[in-house]
Image: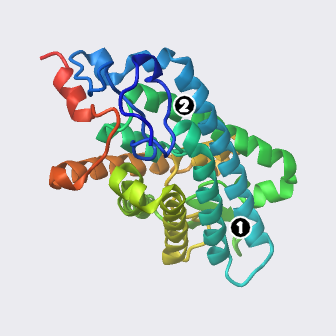
Amino acid sequence: MAQINRPTMEEDKVHAFSSPMPLMSEHWKTEEGKKSNPSTLSEVLGLRELFSPQVWRASLAELVGTAVLVFAIDAIVISSIETNISAPNLVLSILVAIIAAILLIATNPVSGGHINPVITFSAALVGIISFSRAAVYIFMQCVGGVLGALALKAVVNSSLEKTFSLGGCTLTVVTPGPQGPITVGIETGQALWLEIICTFIFLFASIWMAFDHRQAHAMGKVMVLSIVGIVVGVLVFISTTVTTVKGYAGAGMNPARCLGPALVRGGHLWTGHWVFWVGPTISCFAFYLYVKLIPRQHFHAEGYKHDIFNYVKTLPK
């Protein structure tokens, strides 16, 4: 078990699971080992981390992890449908669960294992990481999403790229019809609700365990991150099955994964793209509200400990 008292020069390090901190967190202590109590807006936001080499070096794991995630998942989307198997949604969901769990385990010791703006933003809202670290991570995740989409574009032929929209997040597609091209898919409102509901379930049913150091240490890193992967897979299966509509790619639950193919491929991938950002954002705030409403003794998270409420209190009156 790592020691509790640490000098301030180590504050920027992202601690591994063996630390008494929860998964996906950072450590914020004073020289005496006590939690700091910042009084300025700069301290609450953790602005010093914007210029911390340690934070930027840790964020490389977010970039690489997200790039691999986008490449792998989008390739799985294309291959599971192209192979004409009887239950492509089920195969897709299982493979997504496996790859997500593996990448979370791989990136956790370096950056905390987010590879998803939803995880990063919710961690900042509840006070596990600073908003400045969250901004760095989300930026690198988006860059990683673009790199992953570029890598996939480089290895698939133009016909597959066009047919499967580079495996990106879609609400609708244009297909040939008896009277000419027709648009098939789901309505924006329906997609938004699916995004909100699935993302909140993702946070409530799995990320909660990673944020709570009691559960994280009792169950073990591999078990917790495997559960995160399983929940993602189940939600992918539910969202793609409940609609049974061609053209809808299912709940994104990861804006960076949706952004990469949209920037690289463009076209109809931008149709309703805002849904894959607005939906998860609403879910993150709903999750934060849930954390604030439950009795404090039932949420045992450690980390930065200066959430969005502390930020609001520091604003000029």
Residue situated furthest bottom in the rendering: 86
* Marks 2 and 1, how far apart at CA: 41 Å
Q: Amino acid at mark 2?
A: Phe
Mark closer to the chain start, 2 or 1: 2
Displayed quadrant of residue 182: bottom right
- Quadrant where the C terminus sits is top left
* Label 1 crowd (10 A; few <14 / some 14-19 / many >=20): few
Residue wearing tag 2: 139
Whole-percent x and y of residue 68?
A: 70, 47
Q: Amino acid at mark 1?
A: Gly
Residue at the image point whose x is 35% and y is 60% from the top: 204
Q: Which mark is residue 167?
A: none
Relative side of 248 to 69, left or right: left
Mark 1 element type: loop
Q: Is residue 129 visible?
A: yes
Relative side of 114 to 150, left or right: left
Residue at the image point whose x is 84% and y is 45% from the top: 154
Whole-percent x and y of residue 118?
A: 45, 46
Residue situated furthest left in the rendering: 317
Numbered-mark total: 2
Displayed quadrant of residue 159: bottom right
Foreground residue, 36 or 154? 36
Residue at the image point whose x is 26% and y is 27% from the top: 34
Residue wearing tag 1: 180
